[in-house]
Image: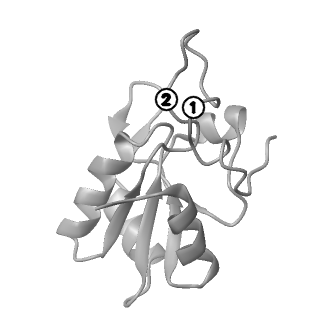
Amino acid sequence: GDVSPQLAHAWWQAGEAVLVDVRTDAEREWVGFVPGAVALAWKQWPGMALNSAFDEGLRAAVPAGKKAVLLCRSGVRSVAAAKRAAQLGIEAYNILEGFEGDPDEQAHRGRKGGWRFHGLPWRQG
């Protein structure tokens, strides 16, 4: 399923869910990251090949009885990652809008939705 950034944040803060950032290391480094989120790329930069360690990393990150809320740039890769998590038996949700949201009329992200846009915790650098 899909959840809003605000609901994902509330579940995470309440200890009901583990926040998993499935963006690449490069994206987190250059664009920003959520302090305390599990960094586990769905695809690896460069080339965007599937991360062969994803399943193992996700199982290690999400304890039994907790949900996983998955975050990517725009909410696309995290859909695939959430589907994979569900196949592994983990209750998982895609975070709508992603970290940066959709591009605006000038193709700039961060102005039309997303984790950052909604004022949820994040850092850069």
Categorize mark 1 by other alpha carbons within 10 Å: few (<14), some (14-19), many (20+).
some
Could you tell me which secondary element the residue under label 2 belongs to? loop
What residue is at 64 percent from the left and 42 percent from the top?
A: 28
What residue is at 53 percent from the left and 76 percent from the top?
A: 11
Disc 2 marks which amino acid?
Asp
* Residue 31 place in picture, x, y as percent: 68, 34
* Quadrant of the rendering where the C terminus is positioned: top right
32 or 54, nearer to the observer: 32
Cα–Cα gap, marks 2 and 1: 6 Å
What is the residue that sits farthest to the left in this orientation?
A: 87
- 38 left or right, relative to 2: right
What is the residue that sits farthest to the top in this orientation?
A: 106
- 36 left or right, relative to 62: right
Q: Is residue 105 above or below residue 11?
A: above
Q: Is residue 20 above or below residue 59?
A: above
- Residue 39 visible to an observer of this rendering: no
* Residue 6 place in picture, x, y as percent: 57, 62
Q: Earlier in the sequence, mark 2 or mark 1?
A: 2
- Residue 2 visible to an observer of this rendering: yes
Disc 1 marks which amino acid?
Lys
Could you tell me which secondary element the residue under label 1 belongs to? loop
96 or 33, nearer to the observer: 96
Query: Disc 2 designates what residue?
Result: 102
* Residue 101 place in picture, x, y as percent: 53, 35
User: Contact (CB < 8 A) between labels 2 and 1?
Assistant: yes
* Quadrant of the rendering where the N terminus is positioned: bottom left
Query: Disc 1 designates what residue?
Result: 112
* Residue 19 place in picture, x, y as percent: 53, 66
What residue is at 59 percent from the left and 25 percent from the top?
A: 109
